[in-house]
Image (spheres, rainbow, N blue to C red):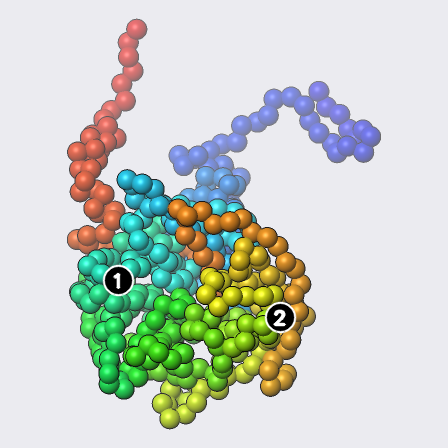
Amino acid sequence: MRAGRLAGLPFYTMGRRRRRRRDDKGCSSREIPSDMLQEILVKLPIKDVLQSCRVSRLWRSVVSDPSFRNLHADTYVAPLGDTESLLVSVRSVPGQMDEASVFNVSSGKAMCSFPIPSHYGLANACNGLLCFAYDRDGSRGSAPAIVCNPATGERLTLPKPPAKDKIRMFALGFSAPTKEYKLFCLSYPPHSDLPEASVKVHVYTLGDARGWRRHSFHSPSRPVDLAAPVLIDGMLYVMTIGWQGTQLPTKLLVVDVSTEMCYTCHLPAYNAYDESLVGIYEVGGRLCFLAHASNPNSRVVHCWVMSPSWRDQHFDHNKLTQWDPLYRFKIGPFYPFRPWIAWFEGDKMFCYITSNTLHNFDLTERSMESVADHGQTVLLDQQLKVPATSPKCKWHIYGGYRPTLFSPLTFALPSSNDDDNGHESRHQFELALLHKFKGRKQRRLKI
């Protein structure tokens, strides 16, 4: 039965629908050729590419192809300020492995969840990948790091570092010119009476069968985990503190991911009540340093950004790194020894949590240029109460995340003792049995 336009409805046909011819892959003959589809999808943002998997089997197969995912990671360039924030939680389960979960704060959706060894935490985020590492000092100093892509849920356990020092720090870096991911393991003594002490730097290029390499340098300060290492333009920035541990941080450790050289640069002059009230972040593609005012009653968090001309200084120890005062955030009452969390939603918003209260500061009308000696004063835009933290769940929010389709499994080594290979060794019988099931012929039962 056919009908024309009735009551504004479009022309339609009722009756038997024609079945579209499909090839062996289940793809319709009317669909776009896979090579043309790949050229289209490679130009789209990652969020749109992942949603395109729901269109058809062909689209899903194109997106799942490792060659396409690597091509997209190499060619697609997101806008500099187009970053997202992640909520990363680690929940302890008695008698079992801990569970790590990643949520996208910007979209409010869950991304992935997977088991993780106890006492592991997020070391840092790097070019779309997350690095988890053992976050306690002690006998498990050689515990391996785990790299995860939260956009795809894939993860890989990396080879164990050779260093046996009890105090160590992991940081994942990426070199754009060489397209290499490198894991840096910094190990150092807890203190030193000398003005400088040796910091061992073990480096592992992901996917390199030759394993770890070792460097060392003498540093006027030691790394400290006051904030997660930040990667900007191929440089890893790490907070440091004096070897005696009695003064506020005055320098940053800078690691050139490409050359693997280490330097130090100065922080801006500031006053803070305690070392726990400072941190480094990324905002608008630039390195940002936050410090609470020395007087808690002033209720101000100062924000500086590193000057774009910093590369011209070549990290000269005798020169002060230029920092530009950017913002002065008016925060409510804060207490020096209470935990706090801060992050930037791209360059559009600054978020700050303390005492179960979220403070939002709108930056959409603000400029990234310094306009005064103390920066632009930003007043509170919104204040919200957040749920109380469960004692079994540790969580943190990290800004500056740029999603990627790149698979960490690309770096899996045939003989590596990663988590997946360990899983296979524990389940050889089950895997062999499943292989037999997969290879058996399907026979119809005669009735």
For badge 2, the amino acid type reads Lys
Relative image position of residue 368 (x, y in whole percent): 59, 76
Give the vertical position of 369 relative to 383 (above or below): below
Residue tagged 2:
330
Q: Secondary structure at mark 1?
A: loop
Q: Residue at x 48, y 85 (%)?
A: 269
Question: Callout 1: 10 Å neighbours few (<14), some, many (20+)?
Answer: few
Q: Is residue 125 visible?
A: yes
Give the vertical position of 416 relative to 380 (above or below): above
| Distance in Å between CA atoms under marks 1 and 2 | 36 Å
Question: Callout 2: 10 Å neighbours few (<14), some, many (20+)?
Answer: some
Relative image position of residue 417 (x, y in whole percent): 19, 52
Q: Residue at x 23, y 43 (%)?
A: 423
| Quadrant of image for the N terminus | top right
Q: Is residue 344 visible?
A: no
Q: Residue at x 52, y 31 (%)?
A: 20
Furthest-bottom residue in this view: 318
For badge 1, the amino acid type reads Asp
Disc assigned to residue 137? 1
User: 311 left or right of 191?
Assistant: right
